[in-house]
Structures are given as C-alpha cells and as structure tokens.
Image: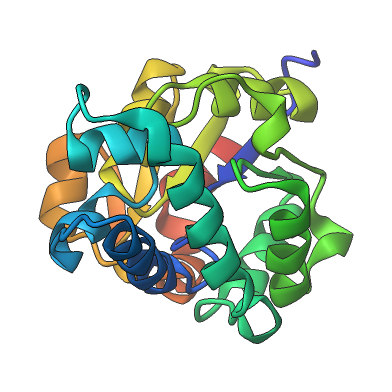
C-alpha cells in the first residue's frame, strides 16, 4: 500500500444509481407474497443493509427464517426486471471522472451480486475511471458491518486515513465509521441531510451533481491536496 495514494469509495445503490425506491417496492412485494405487511417507509429506511440484516431488521431477529431465501429470491426476480432501465443519478459519472482527474482512485464499494453490479456499471457508463469494485462475494458480512469497505480499501490500495466514502444511507455512514473512514452523505437516496449528519456524515449534498459542483471546496479536494 502506497501511503501517498488517495481515493474515494462510492456506495452505488441510491448514491450513484437511482435504485432505492425500486428496492423498496420489490422488497415490499416479496414480503407481501410471504404474508408480511411491512410499510414501505420502514422498508426504505432499511435499504442499504444486506438482505440478511434487512429481513432481521424488518421482521425481528427471532422471526422464522425458513422463508428468508424465498423472499430474497422473490425480491431479486422482481428487481431484475428493472436492470435494463436503471438510471444514474444526476452527475454520477461526472463526479467519478472529476475525482479521477484529480489523481484519486475511484472504487465502487457495493454488496451487489456480480450480475447486478454489471447492470449498475452499465447504467453509470464510467468504467474507464473506476479503479476497482467490490461485490457480494467479497465480504462475509454486509453493511452496517464494515467488511465491504475494508475489502474495497484493500483492493484499491488505500488506507482509511487517505480515503473517504460517499454514501446515501445511515448504514453507509455507520459502516464507514467502523472502517475508520469519514463519510460524505448524499440525500438522493431518500435519507435527509439531518439524519446523515446525525449518523456522522461530515458533509451532505443533494446528489452527485451537487457534490461535483462543490468539489473544490469539499472534503474530497482537501484530502487530494
């Protein structure tokens, strides 16, 4: 690891690609099919967790897990129908390119499956500036545990002191703190700036476009030197 190397880790769902409400609706339907009536507002607040933690969070840690795999499969089947229509959030690709142009390594810290990550990357259309990316198979435990961020740091050759995370959920901020990272929050995933700051985000922006427009005054520019 080169101590002079600096970079930015990016959550993908809800941060760079507009997927959070698609996940909310498809989880709602998967839960409904299994006989669970969970308000969409509660589901939305859980998006950003891995599916194992999400179900425990929504149904309780003592719920009958015999149908968990069926619910996960149903969610995936429903969500997959949107893959060819996924859209990047405003300024997502421009932000990645702006970070790379400053000599920063760009890493996608995602817990999506390899196939889902491929769909997300197609939507972003910024592969030329992405140094590395993680997927579900890279870590044993999902956010808010820090595992996926630790793997992303290692794959990008970065130390926590020389990197930042950009994320959209409270779970991103918590995972970043556990990994020793500072986190910049974006509200385009549906979580408010106040919630992100209360969780520990050092800065908040409306979306990648707003962060990109303010990049020279942001924590990213200060880290880049």
Numbered label tally: 0
Closer to the camera in the image, 91 or 221: 91
Q: Quadrant of residue 104?
A: top right
**Percent from the top left, x then y, of residue 22?**
43, 73
Task: Name the residue rendered at 42%, 65% in the picture.
Answer: 23
**Percent from the top left, x then y, of residue 65?**
35, 30
For the N terminus, the quadrant is top right
Query: Left of 196 or right of it: where is 125?
Result: right
Task: Name the residue rendered at 55%, 53% in the picture.
Answer: 73
**Percent from the top left, x then y, of residue 81?**
62, 78
Colour basis: rainbow
Task: Name the residue rendered at 69%, 47% in the picture.
Answer: 113
Q: Quadrant of residue 28?
A: bottom left
Q: Is residue 211 above or below residue 107?
A: below
Note whether residue 19 is visible.
yes
Task: Name the residue rendered at 34%, 52% in the picture.
Answer: 47
**Percent from the top left, x then y, of residue 84?**
71, 82
């Amino acid at each position: 690891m080169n101590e002079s190397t600096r970079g930015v880790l990016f959550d993908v769902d809800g941060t760079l690609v507009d997927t959070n409400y698609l996940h909310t609706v498809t989880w709602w339907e998967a839960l409904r099919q299994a006989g669970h009536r969970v308000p969409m507002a509660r589901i939305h607040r859980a998006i950003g967790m891995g599916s194992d933690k999400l179900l425990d969070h929504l149904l309780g840690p003592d719920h009958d897990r015999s149908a968990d795999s069926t619910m996960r499969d149903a969610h995936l089947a429903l969500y997959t129908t949107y893959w060819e229509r996924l859209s990047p959030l405003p300024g997502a690709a421009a932000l990645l390119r702006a970070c790379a142009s400053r000599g920063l390594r760009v890493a996608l810290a995602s817990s999506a499956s390899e196939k889902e990550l491929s769909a997300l990357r197609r939507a972003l259309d910024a592969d030329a500036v992405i140094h590395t990316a993680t997927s579900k198979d890279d870590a044993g435990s999902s956010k808010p545990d820090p595992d996926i961020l630790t793997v992303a740091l290692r794959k990008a050759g970065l130390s926590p002191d020389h990197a930042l995370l950009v994320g959209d959920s409270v779970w991103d901020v918590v995972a970043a703190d556990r990994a020793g990272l500072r986190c910049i929050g974006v509200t385009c995933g549906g979580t408010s700036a106040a919630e992100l700051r209360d969780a520990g985000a050092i800065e908040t922006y409306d979306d990648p476009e707003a962060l990109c427009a303010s990049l020279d005054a942001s924590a990213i520019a200060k880290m880049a030197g």
